[in-house]
Amino acid sequence: MNARPPSHAQSASPAFNKMRRACRIPRGTMWMLALALILPHAGCLGPSPTQPNASRSADRDNASESSASTSSPPAARTRTDSIDAVETPRKVYQIQMYRVTAPRGTLTRNENLWRAMDEEVLSLSTRDLLDKNGILAGVAPLSELDGLMDVLESPEITQSSLIGTRAVRFEIEMRRGVRQQTLMWFDQTGALRGRDYDQSTNLLAVSFRQTIRRPDHVSITLAPLVRSERRQLQIGPQGGEREIQFTQPESIYDLGASVDLPLDHFLLIAPSQQANLDSSVGRHFFTQDEPEQRLEIALLIVPTVRTKIETPVTSQVVPPP
């Protein structure tokens, strides 16, 4: 039989065996060294096979939260056009305006008439400002109209009427064809202002609308307005001449006033005692000099409701800011 070759242990010298025994590492220590070399690189091998679903679910949650915080717009809000549950029906008004001309003092000096008028419908500052500029204003119940007509003896009355849900800048003629006038008035700061006008017409600009949240009232806004006229002669390219007329309306906003007028009342605007001053607005708008006598002009405004328009409450989507 052939002899088996000697093993390495058998062929090694006694000195080599001694050195190998000295350098031999225990089996437990070898496993610990192997784990120490493998674990730092475990992240390169992907997620742990024991918890793949949990890790991916957490990543999806984090991504969705980040996307919602950066790019998702807030949800649209829905609101109704009306703050209240039921919108106030719109009304069609008929505003009747009477320009009344009577001898001077018929209205302004009648204490019984103004005792029945409520002048506090205007603020105290507005009342004082209008009075200083020659204008009085007040409201009274419609039942007082009969007494007003009894005061007026054969008055000259010009009537105009507005019908609609609202009106803007309707003009009522107070004096026409004024060749030259100088108006002086106190503004809202108390300063005295003035303006010269040549050929002009004096008017009152009137607007009205339904009063917000007060269905039994109508808001009336008035302001004095002067429409001046100017003519200019121009020569054409062939030597022909023609006259061009320019008109320029100018409102005196300092003397504007707004009144929330009850539907069962009327509004009266007349000259005050300060209208005796030659250059006051009250003199030029609410008085008129005739050869035989001096007249005063008053404006009477009577509101009525012709019909109501039922407006349903609608919804609309408000886009996010």
Image: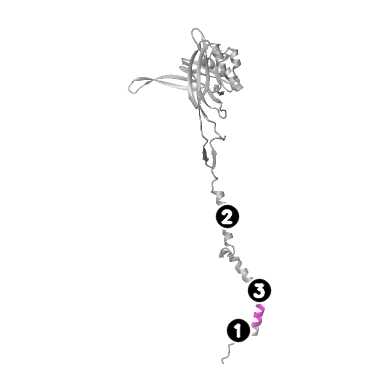
Residue 19 falls within the magenta-colored stretch: yes
Question: What amino acid is found at the position of numbered circle 3 in the picture?
Answer: Gly
- Along the polypeptide, which appears first: circle 3 or circle 1? 1
Q: Mark 2 or mark 1: which is in front?
A: 2
Reading the chain from its start, which is encountered first: label 2 or label 1? 1
- Residue placed under numbered mark 3 in the picture: 28
Please report contact status of discs 2 and 1: CB closer than 8 Å, yes or no: no
Figure coloring: one colour
Region of the chain picked out in magenta, as a range: 17-23
In three-dimensional space, the C-alpha distance between marks 2 and 1, rounded to whole angstroms, equals: 61 Å
Q: What's the amino acid at mark 1?
A: His
Q: Amino acid at mark 2?
A: Asp
Q: Which mark is residue 65?
A: none
Q: Quadrant of the C terminus?
A: top right
Provide the secondary structure element on which disc 2 rests: helix
Mark 3 Cα shell of 10 Å, populated few (<14), some (14-19), many (≥20): few
The quarter of the image holding the N terminus is bottom right
Which label sits on residue 61? 2
* Residue at the image position 66 percent from the left and 82 percent from the top: 18
Q: From the top left corner, tell me how far across and down residue 9 is, in percent.
A: 62, 84
Q: Residue at x 56, y 50 (%)?
A: 68
Would you name the residue on which mark 1 appears?
8
> Which residue occupies the foreground of this view, 78 or 233?
78
Residue 203 position, x and y percent, is: 49, 19
* Residue 225 higher or lower than 311, as above or below: above
